[in-house]
Image (spheres, coloured by chain):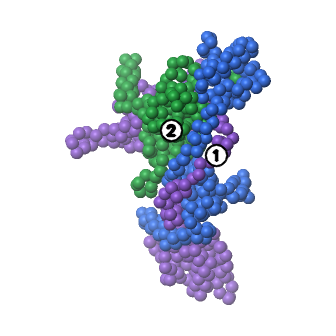
Chain colours: A purple, B green, C blue
Amino acid sequence: MGCKLEMAIEIKLAAFEGPLDLLLHLIEKNKVDIYDIPISEITEQYLDYIRQMEAQDMNVMSEFLVMAATLLDIKCRMLLPKEVDEDGEEEDPRAELVAKLLEYKAYKYMSYELKDMQTDAGRAFYKGPTLPQEVASYRAPVDYEELLGGLTLPGLRGLFESCMKRQEDKVDPIRSRFGRIEKDEVNIDEKAKYVTGYIRTHSRMNFRELLENAGSRMDVIVTFLVVLELMKTGAVSVEQEGIEADIIITARQTSEEGTDVPELTSLG
Amino acid sequence: MDRRQQEAVIEAVLFAMGDSVELGKLAEALGEEKETVRQIVVEMKKRWEQEGRGIAIAEFEDSFQMCTRGEMYEYLVRVAKTPRKYVLTDSLMETLSIIAYKQPVTRLDVERIRGVNSDHAVNRLIELELVMELGRMDAPGRPLLFGTTEQFLRSFGVKSLEELPRLNEGKWEEFKQEAEEEANLSLQV
Amino acid sequence: MDRRQQEAVIEAVLFAMGDSVELGKLAEALGEEKETVRQIVVEMKKRWEQEGRGIAIAEFEDSFQMCTRGEMYEYLVRVAKTPRKYVLTDSLMETLSIIAYKQPVTRLDVERIRGVNSDHAVNRLIELELVMELGRMDAPGRPLLFGTTEQFLRSFGVKSLEELPRLNEGKWEEFKQEAEEEANLSLQV
């Protein structure tokens, strides 16, 4: 019996639309006032739910975790002396959350109302056109000049460019830089050649020396990547005393002819 | 053309077009002023209802469409295929209610209110033709603005957004009272 | 069910089915004998004619179909020929610009660039004959490829796509730089 009851109470997290939904559920289940949420208890229960969802999709999970952090933050602030706003009134750390919950609850409530309306409206049948052939096949001529309004070719180009820019903006800037390393900004093959050549002639050097004619930050990154690659292949050994200290690169002598530095074809 | 003829033309046009017909088109067909035509259609609509006819006139913003009267449903399902009906999941309904009440609205607005990423829901509602792009907001990044469609009005049986049940502060007050009563109850227990 | 209700059901069924409806189906919907139903329909048909309504009932063998009355034909033509005011909305213009510059392009490409389902916009541009299908891409799912039409060139007064204004390389550099500056900022943090 007890077991059955537990199963009934345990609600799958997937059933919640999001952290706010879960919070509302907990508030209702505990029959507490939304304006006076016992933050400690609710936070505890919320975290219990989160623990059960470990195996869930990370995207969903992260949204629940953000709320968990918010709850913990509120919980901490509740313990501290009350903050006072400009008007000298005490600020309730829960106020923002309460407002969010109320707003969400209002829309959620309306979604139920809408659902009922949809059921009623679904009782009407509509039909497609039954036009005589000639009428059906008639296409009103389009006045293209009017249609295009003020849209010109340069305008069209501008629109395209702003679409592409928006898309670009959405791209993670750091990752997108990695993409460009291979493309054009720094010719990685040339860089590799330069670095290996330098190492071949110098046998022991400071990493800074390698950067002497490095122009951009991108040059630095690529040079560093090349050194890492050489380290991996065993062509050089690298030491550094401390975080701020110089990076010392030593070429490994493998033959009398000098340093055997393998050709680096690509780092991509 | 007498009134009876005018009504006949409206009936024929609404029947034949099947889809919703803009008031302007009806006016063009009749060679009358829009407002005159609107009056005629609204009167027809009322009379059909009173007469308990099998068909009815639905109104959406400035368009009209012929459909069967709701009461006919039980007879129709015996012989006709029921209209396509999409069961909207809770997350779609939530997203739709936010868009319906807050339009024009950006994705970010929806996300903020729901507390979860809603891109998928918004895209699905666009696919179902319940939601459409209204344009871009004049703000940094020019985010897209969304609103509801005529199909939304049709699916929810309202002729305009004004007819949607009010989302008002009063409702919030109700929630508050409910919560308080619940809280009191639990204190008494 | 009284006679008026029976007629309402017949009207609704004929409307909803659209095509011709067998007598048997009408009888099924009403729960009445076929011959009784036939009598009712035939009477309705006559009365509608007398009343000069816009819709009529056509009879074929043992089937009935709702249709517009012949006299209404000229009004239907008038509605169909009502000049429509076409407007290119923001989303249509955006979609058109992407198709123009990235053709041949799939729906998914457009969606990825705009960040929103653009099926509706693509379809509308096809209707307006500014965009057309170019064929299918040789890739999984064989998606449709779209490009601009001759009408597109004509409307913009160019002879070929080569005449489209070149993308502003300077602009691209700007985007890149902006992105890099952002990246630098975040690296410094």
Which residue is farthest top? C2
Q: Secondary structure at mark 2?
A: loop
How far is the residue under mark 1 from the one under mark 2?
Answer: 20 Å
Mark 2 residue crowding within 10 angstroms, few (<14) / some (14–19) / many (20+): some
Q: Is residue A193 visible?
A: yes
Mark 2: amino acid: Gly
User: For mark 1, does the 10 Å Cα neighbourhood hold few (<14), some (14 to 19), or many (20 or more) residues?
Assistant: few
Residue B79 versus residue B16 in the image, above or below: above
A98 vs A244: above or below: above
Instruction: Report the residue at 43% width, 65% height from top.
Output: C185
> In this picture, is A114 found above or below A61?
above
Q: Chain of mark 2?
A: B
Task: Give the residue pinned by disc 2.
Answer: B31
Query: Where does the N terminus of chain A fall, quadrant-wise?
Result: top right
Looking at the image, which residue sits at the far left?
A88
Tell me residue B57's x, y (percent). Answer: 54, 28
Residue B74 or residue A150, whichever sits in front: A150
Quadrant hosting residue A91: top left
User: Residue at 61% across / 84% down in the picture?
Assistant: A197
Residue lying farthest to the right in this orientation: C61
Q: Position of residue B172 (x, y in %)?
A: 37, 30
Do we see residue C114 in this rendering?
no
